[in-house]
Amino acid sequence: MLTIGSHVGFNKNTQLLGSLEEALSYEANTFMFYTGAPQNTGRSPIDDTLTKQAFDKMKENKMDPSKVIVHAPYIINLCNEENFDFSVNFLTEEVKRVNQLGIQYLVLHPGSHVGLGIEKGIQHIIEGLNLVFSSVKENQVTILLETMAGKGSEVGSKLEEIKTILEGVKDQSHIGVCLDTCHLNDSGYDMSDFDSFLEEFDKIIGIDKIGCIHINDSKNPRESHKDRHENIGFGTIGFDSLIKIIYHKKLEEVPKILETPYVEKEYAPYKQEIEMIREKEFNPKLIEKIKGY
């Protein structure tokens, strides 16, 4: 069965239950959220009562909690020497929060080396991840390194870079990969020939390491290194290519998450995009439909 959802909010008053209810309003059967604002350290204590209510409601709606995803905040940058200790400590606390929530997967941007160089940046990431895993006892969370577009000094825009990081992590049972279709396109991989990409990925890393896929179209041509998401079917990757990725036989069990932009910064597109994906039919008037025209 197709497991598809989108990014949703996480409000301190409703927490996981509120995130779930937003996902259900989009007729999704999974979702992804931040446990707090991605750009700062503000975090409310996890309310276990709300978490239990959310898990009960997931069961009622036949939603598999093991397919729900948390995204780590952007301000974590294990590459950066100046903020290394902060990033390790903050990521450690985030892993603890995700454990408390009972969620299995945490997506993490590898980071930007900010002039340090790819090799040293990668070594910092490896060191940081090993410190995090050694600091969290009875950990159930798998960190998924997200494939990046290669904007600025980002690490992780090449599969070989991801591979090197993965190989350096001591706890192999709790490390994996999150593919992002927009990032892959913008980094130079051809999403219209996904079979070839997946074959290459399997040789370099192994398909079994894929824990999540961010499904996004791109505003930019391939190898632009810009990272600008577009609504499904309205970008340079295109609807047909994205559908082939979403329904790929080798990735049937992998949850797919939409991170497409709001329409005019106001209208969430997710319900309509999920409907379009399930019907496998592109609606060129999707934007008008979202706005209620």
Image: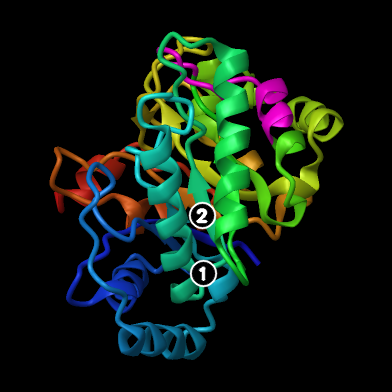
Q: Give the x, y percent position of residue 16.
A: 34, 74
Q: Give the x, y percent position of residue 70.
A: 44, 58
Q: Is residue 90 left or right of residue 194?
A: left
Residue type pointed to by label 2:
Leu
Residue under pointer 1: 103
Q: Give the x, y percent position of residue 100.
A: 45, 75
Nearest the viewer among 290 and 196 is 196
Residue under pointer 2: 106
Q: Secondary structure at mark 1?
A: loop
Indicate the quadrant where residue 32 lies.
bottom left
Residue at (56%, 32%) from the top-left corner? 125
* Quarter placement of the N terminus: bottom right
Indicate the quadrant where residue 22 lies.
bottom left
Q: Secondary structure at mark 2?
A: strand
Q: Are marks 2 and 1 in contact (CB under 8 Å)?
A: yes
Task: Based on the picture, tell me whether residue 158 belongs to the magenta stretch.
Answer: yes
Indicate the quadrant where residue 260 lies.
top left
